[in-house]
Amino acid sequence: MRRTILALPLALAACGSHSPERVAATATGFVSHQLCSAVFVSGAEPEHYYKNGIEPVLSPLGDLVTHQVDRTAGTVTARFAGSETRALYRGAYGCTLDLPPQASFRPIAADPPSPGPVEPTDPRLRAAIDREFAPAAGRTTSAVVILHDGRIVGERYAAGYGIETPLHGWSATKSVTNALLGILAHQGRIDVEAAAPVPEWADRDDPRHAITIDQMMRMTTGLDLGQSLVAGFGSAFDPAAQMLFTRRDMAGWAARQPLIAPPGTSWTYTDGNTILLSRIIRDLAGGDAAATLAFARRELFDKLGMRGVTLEFDGVGTPLGGSHMHAPARAWARFGQFYLDDGVVDGQRLLPVGWVEAAARPTPAADRFGYGAGFWTNRGDGAGARSRIEGGMPADAFMARGSFGQYVVIVPSARLVVARFGVFHTPYGDIDAMNRLVTSAVAALK
């Protein structure tokens, strides 16, 4: 999941540690970037997306933020309380905030089209998918894809969406970052248990020097990075949201933050950890956006058959690996199948033996929520896992999960992957509905 901005009360700025200017910039950065991605990456109609995907997040101040879409220039500009932020569309690299100077982004060719949707033949599965697309307050499903033993057994799209439509995964992107790190580990290029290669912490006397890649993936670094888990009335004051929507060099900012707890002793879910991991991937892939995207395509997306993926970057070419990958629902489902198959595709192992189990293994400090390493998990006996199991989701399930109800649920015991995307302004990331969908799919496909 990702923490986003539910309200932006500038009147409260005097009570916090951040300036009104930074809060306003977070608001305009959020609007311009998200609307840019929706329009130019996913092909959404601007005003419809703003009304359904942005305005409820900004409530009650949605009417005060103005925006302008320039299709010719490929830009979206947002204005609020004296702040103006522009986002630029950069083709295969998606959108990035215009916070100069900008990194270089080289053109990359698009993928060819795919065949049509697969209708479910099982009436119980069809009924389960019907329920997902039934009108309901605060719930708008865009796409559902269900795989059983690697084969699509049910698939549906809302009006205006289709097989080729890239869908925003929000924090489901963190699971893709886990895969890219796993590939690097399998290639012998990183050791996730050793000190992370962060130049700012190279001094052995720096207490942050001991932080490992595994601790970053598990959100137990102890760094003062804000948090990206719970949204509330003043979220724009949080450092994690400000990093994502106002900073040109996000990892550079994250690397400068101090410790507030010894590494490995506490759990705080924050995008700051994942942006540091993303910079490690970037540096090992070649040091810029083009090399990073080429690495991700060559070593992961192409091998899995993930077509039409857009990974977005910050102003210095670091991928937004905690929050901003867009991909068609089939591509997301293929990613889930990759983890169901233990990191092996077409007989080729891409992830180390035991990597998938480690990703799904619960982090002790996160028992309350049920979090592993880049994935949410039902394994373990924490309250988060228990609540999902009591809702009907199998105990061995684990998932890529993003804000507003984005899910790729992997159920090894049922050889099942359930991918569902949309905009859901309902409690707890619409987990109750997702429990129902997964439970119904398991029952129909036994």
Image: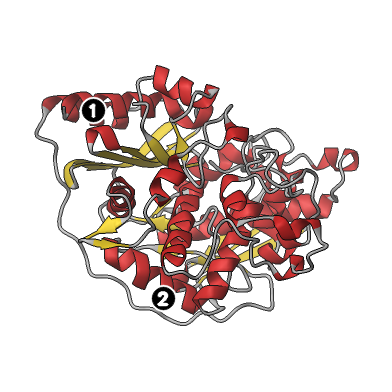
Q: Which residue is mark 2?
A: 294
Circle 1 Cα neighbour tier, 10 Å, few/some/many (<14 / 14–19 / ≥20): many
Residue lying at the far left in this picture: please name it.
121
For numbered disc 2, what is the local secondary structure? helix
- Give the residue type at disc 1: Val
Q: Earlier in the sequence, mark 2 or mark 1?
A: 2
For numbered disc 1, what is the local secondary structure? helix
- Give the residue type at disc 2: Ala
Q: Compared to 350, does 356 lie above or below?
A: above
Circle 2 Cα neighbour tier, 10 Å, few/some/many (<14 / 14–19 / ≥20): some
Residue 366 x %, y %: 59, 33
Q: Name the residue located 55 percent from the left edge and 44 percent from the top edge.
A: 54
Q: Are marks 2 and 1 in contact (CB under 8 Å)?
A: no
Q: Compared to 312, does 263 lie above or below?
A: above
Residue lying at the far right in this picture: please name it.
14
Q: Name the residue located 68 percent from the left edge and 66 percent from the top edge.
A: 198
Q: Which of these two is toward me, 29 or 50?
A: 29
Answer left or right for 122 relative to 408.
left
Name the mark on residue 309: none
Q: Compared to 377, does 356 lie above or below?
A: below
Residue 305 visible in the current orientation: no
Q: Name the residue located 80 percent from the left edge and 56 percent from the top edge.
A: 207
Name the mark on residue 442: 1
Residue 348 x %, y %: 25, 63
Answer left or right for 18 relative to 186.
right
Q: Which of these two is toward me, 29 or 69?
A: 29
Which quarter of the rendering shows the C terminus?
top left
Residue 227 x %, y %: 68, 42
Residue 70 x %, y %: 52, 67
Answer left or right for 408 relative to 401.
left
Residue 104 visible in the current orientation: yes
Q: Name the residue located 64 percent from the left edge and 62 percent from the top edge.
A: 196
